[in-house]
Image: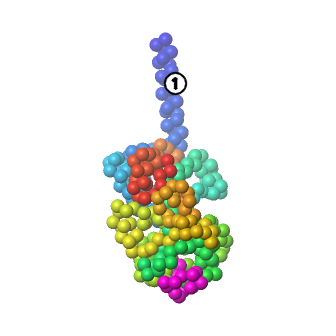
Amino acid sequence: MANTARNLCGVLFLSCIFFSCSLFSKKEDAKDGPAQGEITIAVDESFQLLLKSEKTAFENNYHFAHINLKFTPENEAIADLLNEKVRSIVVSRDLTSKEKEIFTREKITYRSFPFAADGIALLTNKQNTDTLISLPLLKELLQGKISNWNKLGAHSVSGEILLVVDKANSSNIKFLIDKLGIPATQKLAVFAAGSNPAVIEYVKNHSNALGIIGSNWISDGDNPTSLGFIKSVHVMSVAEKDGLAQDKYLQPFGYNLALKTYPLRREIKLILKESHLGLGTGFVNYVCGEMGQLIVLKAGLIPLT
């Protein structure tokens, strides 16, 4: 009986060795583990504040781990992941079938983890008291079919509408293109300010501007940066259709995101490309675990795990 037990333990030990070797199929001498080492994660700029908080909390708990955050437009983050420049990415969409083929060729399991929900927020200047908009009107704005506040029905401001985004290739504008069914080849009537904070600052200083940002930047009431932003602008209320009652126009906060009633709600995903049990896996486990989800909640967003 004792010999049988020893043989069984030997088989299990060899199995563990084989499994560990298979995990390290690409990097036999991996220098990181779930709670130690150093990796780089590319993050869409819309989610900068949230991921900074997650990184700080993670590193405070795991002192031998270091996460480098690279803030970049979503399409560049995905390109970096596929070209092995980063270990993981935080974006607002899953990879396409063609993009996933790279995982298949490299024999790496594709793993995507939705961990938070936010929304696209539409901002206007404090002088602008007209803060209701529908998705059909927003589509016409982006397409340049409406270019004047008077045509939009505004009363407190007039003149040309300055539609401001962070970057022309950001996840914010890509989400709107997909959501509103705008052809990808169509030129949009937008001005790129360079970043989400730059959009807020532009709207703050231009009475006829309409800004497009991720709600992550204005949703955390405990964050001085976020609190300062939200006090300097108006957040528009959005309706799915024209002609709805005023209570059907919703803002990108709280229960509107939780109940999935805000028309421009989206999910934030952490996608991992890791061929071994490394620091990327450890960070995913933390972000999707209790402490990481509390950070999502504190940021004014909706936890998904």
Q: Residue at x 47, y 78 (%)?
A: 129
Magenta includes 158? yes
Q: To which residue does mark 1 refer?
A: 11
Can you name the residue that lies furthest to the top here? 1
In the rendered image, the vertical position of residue 16 relative to residue 177, given as above or below: above
Q: Is residue 189 left or right of residue 215?
A: right
Measuring from the top left, give residue 278's x and y in whole percent.
45, 45
The rendered magenta stretch, by its main secondary structure, is classed as loop
> Of 213 and 158, which appears nearest the observer?
158
Measuring from the top left, give residue 104's x and y in whole percent.
62, 49
Q: Is residue 60 left or right of residue 134?
A: left
Q: Is residue 276 visible?
A: yes
The amino acid marked with disc number 1 is Val
Q: Which residues are magenta?
A: 150-167
Label 1, secondary structure: give it.
Answer: helix
In the rendered image, the vertical position of residue 128 relative to residue 274, given as above or below: below
Q: Residue at x 33, y 66 (%)?
A: 224
Can you name the residue that lies furthest to the bottom here? 159
In the rendered image, the vertical position of residue 259 relative to residue 125, given as above or below: above
Measuring from the top left, give residue 280's x and y in whole percent.
46, 49
> Of 152 and 3, which appears nearest the observer?
152
Magenta includes 236? no
For the rendered model, the colour scheme is rainbow
Measuring from the top left, give residue 158's x and y in whole percent.
52, 87
Give the image quarter of residue 261. bottom right
Q: Residue at x 50, y 65 (%)?
A: 251
> Of 204 and 137, which appears nearest the observer?
137
The local crowd at label 1, few if under 14, some if 14 to 19, many if 20 or more residues have their Cα within 10 Å, is: few
> Of 37 and 290, which appears nearest the observer?
290
Q: Is residue 299 left or right of residue 304?
A: left
Q: How many marks?
A: 1
